[in-house]
Image (tube, helix red, strand yellow):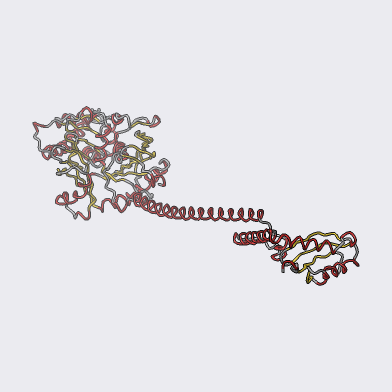
Amino acid sequence: MIKNIFIPERFGSYYIFPQRIIGLDITKTDIYATQTYFKSRSIAIESIMHQQLESAGTYQEKVAAALAKIVEQAGKGAVFFSSISSGLVIAKTIKLPFTSYEKIKMIIAYEIEPSLPFPVANAVIDFIITKTDQTDQSAEVFVVAVQKQNIDEHLALLKQVNIVPQLLTVDMVALYLLYKNFSAQKQASSHQNIVLLDIGNYETRMASIFDGQIKLLRTLPHGIVEQLKAISKQLNISLSEVHGMFVRFGLQGSSDLHFDQAIQHAVNQFIKDIGFTINSFVQQAGTTSQEQNYKIILIGGSEIKGLSESISRTLGIPCEPCKPNDFLYDHQLVMQPTQGSITPPALVSLGTSLSGWQENAFNLMPAEYNTKKSSLINYQLLTAFLLSLLLIVGLWGMRYWQIRSLRSEAYSSVEQTITELQDTFPKSQELQEVEGETPIETLDDAVNIANTIVTQQEKLVNEFSSASRTALVTYLLELSSILDASALGIKAKKISITQERMIFSGSVAHLKDAPQIRQLLLQSPLFGEITPPEAFETTNFNATIALKKPRGNA
């Protein structure tokens, strides 16, 4: 399911993702199931399953028990298609003045409504475009309608074992599509009129095909069992004995003359009923008996000895027993080696499993029951929402990442700039004394300090300009003349002179000489107040001395 959200399972009849499909044919006495595997353009018949309904219990219980066994044998991930009896549907061929599938789908209910014995609102309708004429832009359409009640009853049987089919077809429509798309016989008989005849135990199903197009469906409410019951009653023998002899000898004759006469009589009458229905096909197709050019292909009942020959002889119409392996004529459809051959009773289930092979497949499954489609839409909406949410989160994340990257780059640039400013403009000792060792946190702080240092340097340069240089030298000469460094044991560490003060730091050898230095400085006409007052009370001193202007510069 997840993969279908982004890529469809198939394009036309090409399967992008492999799919396993089980077609179901549920009759009154048996259930046939055929499992097929679709991959790209090839179709493999993986298994054919048959479950006979048990004798005890209600019909619903017997079907549920048989379906449960089929589900156990089903391949992993298999989806189910199912078919309903053609006796439950109303079918009609109509001609419409356009060929577009979408347009036909829009108006088909109105076209078939006059032919329905029940309200169109209570019907499920679908169709097959059997022929198009591009000259006059018209199409012949085979329309099928069935009451929702009948579909609900069929789906209820499947729901007992949690099967919700993705496709619901009609048994004879499935058989027609199998014949039309895959059989070898239709290649040799494309211009013949065909009757697909499926004789079952309790009903007989027929589909008429004219010029390769399905035209009509008919279901007779009796089959082989009814004929055997009549013989059992006529000869006063058990039904099981009659059935055994019929399976063994068919219509080819046995050692019991009475049995042979009874079976021939019963079957001939049954064949005449079939012939009456075939004649109605011919009349509704607008042909006459002289124009008839068709044959019967016997599906169910083809295993009965002599039946096809008896039909040909009685009706005067060629009747050929179905050769199931002829349906493997198409190279796309292959049988798994372990499965042997296909039996005629399994052909409807095979056709059902292949009913979704083409685009715009015939499907009577009501839209409200199509859980796959609704689930897929829900998944697509949820995925679209999640992808949109993911896109929004992704865009927000991208924006956040870009902003964070830019911020990180800006911080890195600021730190690099601060480092370069610190390396280029280190704090002077005076500035460190004023501001301390407080770390620089912002670029503004670094720029301000750099400006302060530049200002100090400019001031220092100015102090050493030609106008100030003589005064600075005068102060240094005065300091060296009044203080005998060797006599007093003075070791100068720093002498810093500005226009207003001089910073003088160092040490003396003897504590007794320190006050003398203070005295000599105060006696000089060029030096003023000394701070701090106790600067020369220890052997180490750091004094700030106010400067007086020389007399010549007053």
Residue 59 pos. (x, y %) = 32, 49
> Which quarter of the picture shows residue 218?
top left
Residue at the image point whose x is 19% and y is 54% from the top: 120
Indicate left or right for 334 with 201 as reference.
right
Q: In terms of image quadrants, where is residue 8?
A: top left
Residue 194 vs residue 373, the one in the foreground: 373
Q: Residue at x 18, y 54 (%)?
A: 118
- Left/right placement of residue 46 relative to residue 89 reads right
Please say if 431 is above or below 273.
below
- Looking at the image, which is closer to me, 162 or 358? 358
Name the image quarter holding the C terminus.
bottom right
Task: Return the residue nearer the eye: 57 or 540.
Answer: 540
Q: Position of residue 446 (x, y in %)?
A: 62, 59
Tell me residue 40's x, y (percent): 36, 35
Q: Is residue 429 left or right of residue 339?
A: right
Work out whether residue 446 or residue 320 is closer to the camera in this orientation and state it: 446
In the displayed structure, 485 sits above or below 311; it is below
The total of numbered circles placed on residues is 0
Looking at the image, residue 404 sits to the left or right of residue 69; the answer is: right
Question: Image quadrant of residue 220?
Answer: top left
Instruction: Give coordinates of residue 244: x percent, y percent.
Output: 30, 34
